[in-house]
Amino acid sequence: MTNIYQIANKLRAESKHLPINRIELEDALNTLIHRVLFPICDQEKSREKKLYYFYSILVENISALLDRKQAEEMVDKFINMLPQLQDKLFDEARVYFDNDPAAKSIEEVILTYPGFFAQVVYRISHEFYKMKTPIIPRLFSEYAHSKVGIDINPGAEIGHAFYIDHGTGIVIGETTIIGNNVKIYQGVTLGALFVTKSLLNEKRHPTIEDNVVIYAGATILGGKTVVGHDSIIGGNAWLTKSVVPYSLVQQNSEIRIHNTLAQEGHTLDFNI
């Protein structure tokens, strides 16, 4: 049998140890979402204990990265904004209900829609990001990414009435700015033209103005790229330059039909 003890001693942990508990933090996030903000399937009526659980887990873990006073100030600030955040999230759940003919109720949106779940986690993580909380915002956003396949960096700035249809494969970079009433479909990338550490403090990702629709598979790149308001970006479009308001951007494809059943020596080749 392999000597487990010997192998374990040979393994090296060269990265810095972070004294936080990822499992606890993810459980606290789920508690906040499913048992405090939206306790639709929770038969227990008291939210106080559940909210205190979230509070205590966050304070203990952030205290391990900063000092206790800073941790308490951050979490206190977040807890105090929860009623307003909840109202905003209910409004956004209604946006999903109003946009999707398949949605039968607000509760169905909250319980089952991956785009809405990713959006809720984004709203939570973004608040901690603005307070410059280390590690926690990205840990939360990557948890949502692992659950529903939607990658929204907590640093992105997203306006109200944001709507994600289906959502799988969406990537929204850290310096992305998204206006109000924007709708995006699965497979959309709002990314950087190229990645280098020297651009850490630069705007690397695009700006999407109000009332824009971005269809499935579209890729929009670059910190100077602005999609003007009331524009439509078609499916699979590739955009690296700004477009003015009311634009329609389409990716034209060529379909070629090769007919191998034609008479011998007379292959048919059509362009459409």
Image (cartoon, rainbow, N blue to C red):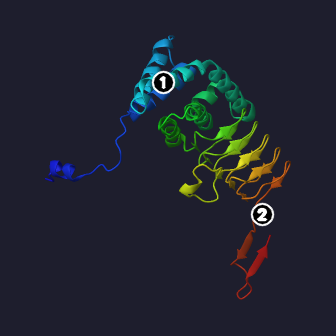
Residue 125 falls in which quadrant of the image?
A: top right
Identify which amino acid the numbered label 1 is placed on: Thr
Whether residue 40 is visible to the viewer of this picture, yes or no, is no
Is disc 1 placed on a helix, strand or loop? helix
Measured from the top left, where is residue 96 in percent x and y? Answer: 70, 32
Residue 144, image x, y percentages: 52, 38
- Report the mark closest to the observer, 1 or 2: 1
* Nearer to us in this view, 82 or 63: 63
Instruction: Give the image location of residue 163, x and y in percent.
Output: 70, 37
Q: How far apart are the alpha carbons under marks 1 and 2? A: 47 Å
Lateral position of residue 55 relative to residue 111, left or right: left
Task: Name the residue type under label 2.
Answer: Asn
Q: State the SS at label 2.
A: loop
- Kindly identify which residue carries mark 2: 252
Residue denoted by label 1? 31
Q: Earlier in the sequence, mark 1 or mark 2?
A: 1
Judge left or right: residue 43 versus residue 171: left
Residue 123 visible to the viewer? yes
